[in-house]
Image (tube, grey):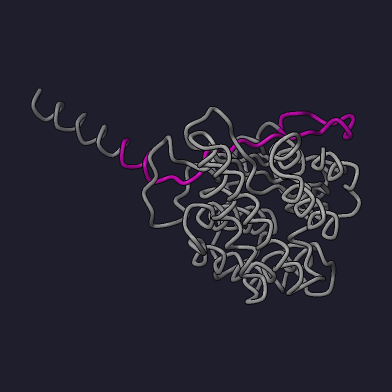
Amino acid sequence: MLRKLFLTTLLLAFFSVFVSEAQELDARVNINHSQVQGTSTSVFENLKTTLEQFLNERSWTDMQFKNGERINCNFNITVNKYSPAENSFDATLLVQGTRPVYGSNYTTTFFSFNDTRFTFNFQEYDQIEFRTDQIENNLTAVLAYYVYLLIGMDMDAMAELGGTEYLQIAQTIVNNAQSLQAKGWKAFEDSKNRYSIITDMLDGGMEPFRKMQYVYHRQGLDVMAENVERGRAGITAAMELLKEANTNKSMSMLPQIFTEYKRDELVNIYKGHGTSKEKEDVANVLGKINASQNSYWRQIKQ
């Protein structure tokens, strides 16, 4: 009896370790419902718990991730309207993925996007499910789309074009979500929606943008702890790829989105560092992509 109990405990421990290594995400969900008055908070608390379980306990790929390798990400949902009678939510979703920088205590954002067209239905204690080939639920479709986008971009930052398989899954979700009535999935609906982002990510002309992810993170940031000058040279090379992507497809919003979440980091990398020409060239590239941030790009030249 003791032997059977020991073996059972051992198997459970093994299974627990296996499961913990199979999950790809270390995701946190935050629900801001301050705009909704006179409603029990329990539905929002249950939504948070349900979504964190959905994101963290599901295996999204065939890869094995140890706990320290899981992708850190945040899903911040701001509820603008909620109808208890219809169990409907009108919200915005801020998605952010971060990764550690090798040899330092610094973490860098590799993707951040505010999706302002996030509507869904959720009833307290709902059990949510997802199938890539059968999209019927906008809530899980949107979350799964961003999961695969995050995994794909994280893989691109680790190996050149390493995330293609997962970005293609995100594109499949977009294709299969065309029957949904919710906004954010359609072509020409918006130049900065889910459809546009993944279509541009997999566009041949935007390949320099994806290659830039690897150069920026692996040959740039990850090198800076041991050699600042060489690391900054990698970042400068990445800016040339960003410039090439912007030239190839000037209507794409991806380069602009990148400059928005990398803005402060880029200023800190170059302000007071590097040659005048290097700083001038980088500031000019960034200014052409996102002129609205010129007050920050001017700091790079200092």
Indicate the position of residue 13 as horizontal and vertical percent values. 26, 32
Q: In this view, does 64 lie above or below 245?
A: above
- Where, by quadrant of the figure, is residue 41 drawn? top right
Q: In this view, does 136 lie above or below 146?
A: below
Image position, residue 88 (x, y; %): 80, 49
Quadrant where the N terminus lies?
A: top left
| Residue 42 lies in the magenta stretch | yes
User: What percent of the width, then of the height, locates residue 197?
Assistant: 71, 64
Viewed as shown, does residue 25 lie left or right of 272? left
Q: Give the range drawn in magenta.
A: 17-44
| Residue, far bottom | 204
Can residue 87 be seen by looking at this rendering? no
Q: Can residue 92 be seen from the camera position used here?
A: yes
Relative depth, front residue between 127 and 115: 115
Please check the rendered image and state whether residue 50 is part of the magenta-colored stretch, yes or no: no
The quarter of the rendered structure image containing the C terminus is top right
